[in-house]
Amino acid sequence: MRYEVKKGTVKHKGVFYPKGSFFDAEKHEVKGLIATGALAPVQFEPLDSSGGAGERDAISTPQTDMTIEELKKFLEDAGFEEVERVLEAELAKPEPRKTAVKLLNDWLENADAQPPTLDADDVIVE
């Protein structure tokens, strides 16, 4: 099964994996790391018609216990759908953090989530 490192750096079979990395392991080998929240199992979407599904298409359980500083670092490289999932998870908490919600909403409002639409007249070919 494939896992994503959610906290810190994980050493598995002599290899160090930093936060955000993916690797394959048997569940019994990493159950202690899963229990501490350092790892989360990853599920993949089925292949689409273009044949693409990879780590970028992975759906993992969003990490909801990030500090504000960790959240800011997460937003530097995060995709639109990942940020939406983290915001949903934050709002689902009994007491969502106002600072985190504002930070995530601001990022989503300012993100250029949709590629520009081009008409044939807009494209210049030399």
Image (tube, rainbow, N blue to C red):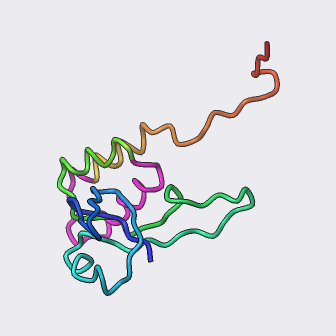
Q: Which of the 4 quarters of the picture holds residue 63?
A: bottom left
- Which of 120/45 is in front? 45
Q: Which of the 4 quarters of the picture holds residue 115?
A: top right
Report x, y in % for residue 108: 41, 45
Q: Farthest residue in the top direction?
A: 126
The answer to whether 91 is drawn above or below residue 32 in the figure is above
Which image quarter is the C terminus in? top right
Q: Which of the 4 quarters of the picture holds residue 32?
A: bottom left
Left or right: where 53 falls relative to 19? right
Give the residue displayed 33% in from the left and 49% down from the top: 104
Whether residue 83 appears in magenta in the rendering, the answer is yes
Give the residue displayed 76% in from the left and 22% down from the top: 123
Q: Which residues are magenta?
A: 78-100
Which image quarter is the N terminus in? bottom left
The answer to whether 9 is drawn above or below residue 27 in the figure is above
Report x, y in % for residue 7: 23, 62
Give the residue displayed 33% in from the left and 45% down from the top: 75
